[in-house]
Structure formats: structure tokens, C-alpha cells
Amino acid sequence: DVRLSPPHPLLSDAEGRRFINCWVCRSESAAWKQTASSRPAAAPAWPGCLAGSCREMFPSLGNTNPCLRLMHRNRSSCYFLLLALAYLLYLSFGALIFSSVELPYEDNLRQELRQLKSRFLEENRCLAPDSLERFLDRVLEANNYGVSVLNNNTGKWNWDFTSSLFFAATVLTTTGYGHTVPLSDGGKAFCMIYSLIGIPFTLLFLTSMVQRLMVHVTRRPIQYIHTRWGYPKQSVALIHAVLLGLLITSCFFFVPAAIFSNLEQDWNFLESIYFCFISLSTIGLGDYVPGEVQHQQFRELYKLGITVYLMIGLTAVLVVLETFCELQKLKEFKRVFYLKKDKLEDEQTILNHDQLSFPAVTDSVPITREQQKLNEPIATGPVPYQFTEDPINR
């Protein structure tokens, strides 16, 4: 929106003030009328024109390199290209680190399995290598579907009610551990239809839940502290976001990790933290899934508790993320990479009328709050604010 654009970064302070007056002149403000003696004849509307009288008014901008002017006019696209480049670099950095850390472990595991297979064939010479390969392929294929041939898993079912409820929760929240998958064609077809309806339904439910929680958890406490003690609202919001993040991290990461490390025999505290983070961030790698150990006590109740934990924890994480996203500094940072919204049709009509400088038209042009604030220090009298249907007022 041209009317809300800040002074050009290449202008001096004095030129910046005259630049503001130049685009305020389209509403025939009192401040611009006061500078009529210094205003060049037939001053063109800003921005976009760097010729003629505008060059005389703004020499710093007129002498700028054309490439710099082009970059300034398309600065949102330039920022986006920098953002895309930074993302690709971050992606490559992650691939490099993962490869350097995990590749040696994978190589050691492959060598260990080859030695184990060779030793097994030497001890059982009556077994043909091809038969062993076919048996192992079938076992691994069944294991990918959540079915194991080990004796300690004969009493564990993957599709009882609580296990199915846990599976449905991981599907609808897009966590998807992958430890249990549909076996039949009918189950696969139903899973696609169920997810097609359920995932948007879950997003709607979580969005509505987060919206209501934000009022009581974030907005009202910040407004109360700001009104009661007079602290700056941005500082209060930042401190509140940090404290809320620490509280959620303690309640939904550290405390559950301590519980999981005690209930799961093969998990240490780091692996439990890893599971909590992978689950609540909806990554869901599936390498750690609770309730899958041998002779798990109260397995049905345990699975139900984990399902409730995932839903409540995901909601809490979304509340924290939304709280940080409402910080003013973060909003300004995100706005740098967004496309500017096009002018509304009625706003464009108003701008065209303003250029005619008819008093009857310009006196009736609604102004925004930002324009009113800019006019207040230099205006001869108060300008009444009129409501307009523009994005700012909405």
C-alpha cells in the first residue's frame, strides 16, 4: 500500500519528510498546503516517477543506480529469493551432518549383519542360502506391517480397539509412526477416505481449540499486566511467550520423558525426550513407539493414555507457536517475505480521484489511522477519522 510506505531508505531525513508530504498531498492535507511555496509545479504522484521535478525534489533518489531502484521496487521478491536460498543451504547443511554422523553407524551395522549371516550358515550347512534369503525377506516384510515372528510378540495384537484408536490418532494428526499399517485392501481404501475427511476435521478442531485457549492463556494475561502495571505490551508479550514455552516444555517433554524412561525398559531419558519431540512435532519416524515391549502391563490403558497425551500435547505446542507468532517483531520479520496485497478497487478509485485535486472530492476521502498520525504533528487542526473498509481497519 503506497499510503503506508515508509520514507525511502536512500533519502535523508529532510528529504524523507518532503517525500511523506508528497504522497500526503493527494489528500490535500494542511501540511502539504503549508509547503506549497516549495513544491514544484505539477508534482507527480509518488512513488514510481524519478524524472523531472521529482528529481529536483529528491536528488538522492534520482541519482540512485537503476539496479538499486529496481531492487527496492521488488524488495519483497528479493527477500523471498534470499529466504529460498537460505532454506536450501539449511537443507544441505542438515543432509551433510546426518550423512557424516549416521553413515559410519550404518556401515558397522551392515558388516555385523553380514558376519552374523555367514556364521549362521556355517553352523547350519544343511540350510541353503537362497532359502534363508526368502525366509528373511518374508519376515522383514511382515515386520514392516507390524507383525513379528518372535515368541515374545505372540500375545500382542495390533488391531484391538485401543491400538486402533492410537493408530487413528496418529493418522489424523499426521504423525504416522508407520509401525502399524493396514494389511487388507479394504483397510487401505478406508484409511485414505478416513484421512481425507479426518485431517481437515482435525485441523478445524485444533484451530478452534487453540483460538479459544489463546484468549485465556495469552491475550488476557498480557492485557491485564499491561493495563494493571503499565509495562510495555511488547515486552510483556515476549516475556510471557518465553515463560509459556518453558512451562509447556517442562510439562509435555521433560516430565513425560521421565515417565517413559521408567515404563519402557529399553529407553533412556534421551530416547524418551526424542520420542516426545518427534511425536509432538508430528514428524513420527516410528523408530520408538511406546507400549510395544514384551508383557506390557495394562497395555490397553497405556495406549489410551498415550493417545490422550498426543492430542493434548499437540494442542499445547500449537498454543506456544501461536503465542510466538503474535509477537510484533516476529510479525514484522515475516511481513518482509510476504507479497504485498493489491489495492482494493475502491481504494484505487479514490487514488485516481485524489490526483484530480478537486476540493469536493479530496475533502470526502477517508484516511487511515496511519495517515492521521503522520498528519497530526504538522496539521493545522484535527482531522476527523472516517471508517474505511480496508485491510488495516478490518
Image (cartoon, helix red, strand yellow):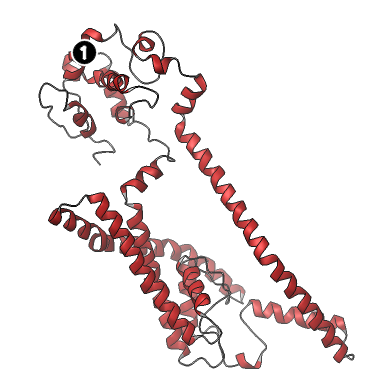
Residue depicted at 41% across the width and 11% down the height: 51
Q: Visible in this render: residue 339?
A: yes
Q: Which amino acid does the dot numbered 1 rest on?
A: Thr
Which residue, given by chain and number where applicable, does mark 1 sit on?
35
Residue depicted at 46% across the width and 18% down the height: 64
- Left or right of 187? Residue 329 is left
- Left or right of 37? Residue 190 is right
- Name the residue nearer the viewer: 68 or 367: 68
Residue depicted at 40% across the width and 61% down the height: 203
What residue occupies the far top of the structure in this picture? 41
Residue depicted at 78% across the width and 75% down the height: 111
- Left or right of 191? Residue 372 is left
- Name the residue nearer the viewer: 102 or 192: 102
Q: Quadrant of residue 156?
A: bottom right
42 w.r.t. 257: above or below: above
Give percent across and percent down for residue 235: 26, 52
Give percent across and percent down for residue 21: 26, 20
Q: Quadrant of the C terminus?
A: top left
Q: In which quarter of the image is residue 104?
A: bottom right
Mark 1 neighbour class, 10 Å CA radius: few under 14, some 14 to 19, many 20 or more: few
125 w.r.t. 314: above or below: below
For label 1, the SS is: loop
- Name the residue nearer the viewer: 387 or 93: 93
Q: Quadrant of the N terminus?
A: top left
84 w.r.t. 155: above or below: above
Give percent across and percent down for residue 360: 16, 16
Give percent across and percent down for residue 299: 48, 89
